[in-house]
Amino acid sequence: MDAPRRTVCIASGGDGMRRSMNAIHRACGISLLIVEEAPVRASARRPHSEGAALHTRARRRLGAAVHRVRRGPLSPTTPVELDPGIETLPVRDASDPRVRATLREMGPDVLLAYGGSLLGKDVLGLAGTALNVHWGLAPWYRGLYTTAWALLGWDPHGIGITVHHMSPVIDGGPIAAQLATPPCPGDDYAAILRRQREAAVDLTVACLHRITQGQALPAVDQDRETGRLYTAEQWSPSLSTAVLDLLADDGAARMIARPSRPGPLDIVRLDKA
């Protein structure tokens, strides 16, 4: 199996996370999956008014009234179980002493964070390479709910996946590789997230294979003055409904035709490195 000798993943989430871990394990092998039950999220006290303003501007771009839709959760999934070959260590969050002790004992070649707590230098230093898989195109979209924020900002070019070298800065480490996953006409939110999940797996596997082959990953420093960091306090349940509203009646096609950003972002492509 062409994979680093020891790959440890730290992840949180439900069926989507388990589906992704299964795919990565089948392609590369995961030595251990540390599952966080209650990861510590990015935090900053900022108002929800920014999201409401973005929603208002997006509605105006539609040029017509948007009706409210009720389609269930933002990302409905079919129940998924982890492959039986994946060894797991359940913890409340990454501050659990067992995380450091296990990593110190294993000395993994790669530590892969797949959604979860911000890790400190003492943890990051226990692996040869420490990577984070971020659902967003950094530095433009860092933090939480970045796909939804891009949609609310009428920015289809801002949707994608970033794999970056981990640092104590939230989604701020040097970038190893990125893939843009703009929506297609007819997409609902579940379709957009599904495309991102598939891209995240593909990009992660490509990075792991490159490490296995002895090739260094790119490490492009971010200009964090570009874009912004989105935190849990900036989000609200009404914005979740707003995302569904904006994609109703093929809002994705109208967004593609009249994006707020004129063209694709200048991202770090692994196939160009």
Image (cartoon, rainbow, N blue to C red):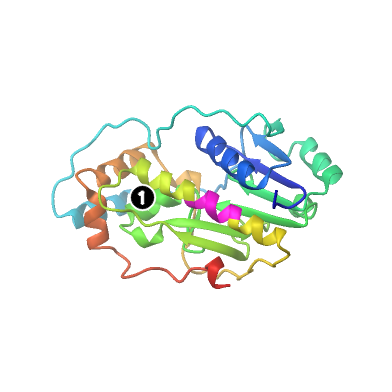
Q: Position of residue 172 (x, y in %)?
A: 59, 61
Magenta segment, prevailing SS (helix, strand or loop):
helix
Residue positioned 70% across, 48% down in the render: 1
Residue positioned 67% across, 58% down in the render: 167
Q: Is residue 124 above or below residue 227?
A: above
Q: Using the image as rendered, state which of residue 51 and residue 99 is in the foreground.
A: 99
Residue positioned 14% across, 55% down in the render: 63
Q: Is residue 228 above or below residue 223?
A: above
Magenta part of the chain: 199-205
* Label 1 neighbour load within 10 Å: few <14, some 14-19, many 20+: many
Residue positioned 23% across, 43% down in the render: 248
Residue hosting label 1: 51
| Amino acid of disc 1 | Gly
Q: Can I make out residue 224 in this image?
A: no
Horizontal side, residue 258 vs residue 192: left or right: left
Residue found at the far front of this picture? 1
Q: Is residue 235 above or below residue 181?
A: above
Q: Looking at the image, how many numbered discs can be counted on the residues?
A: 1
Residue found at the far right of this picture? 105
Q: Position of residue 35 (x, y in %)?
A: 65, 35
Does the magenta run of residues contain 203? yes
- SS under mark 1: helix
Residue found at the far left of this picture? 64
Does the magenta run of residues contain 33? no
Q: Can I make out residue 124 in this image?
A: yes
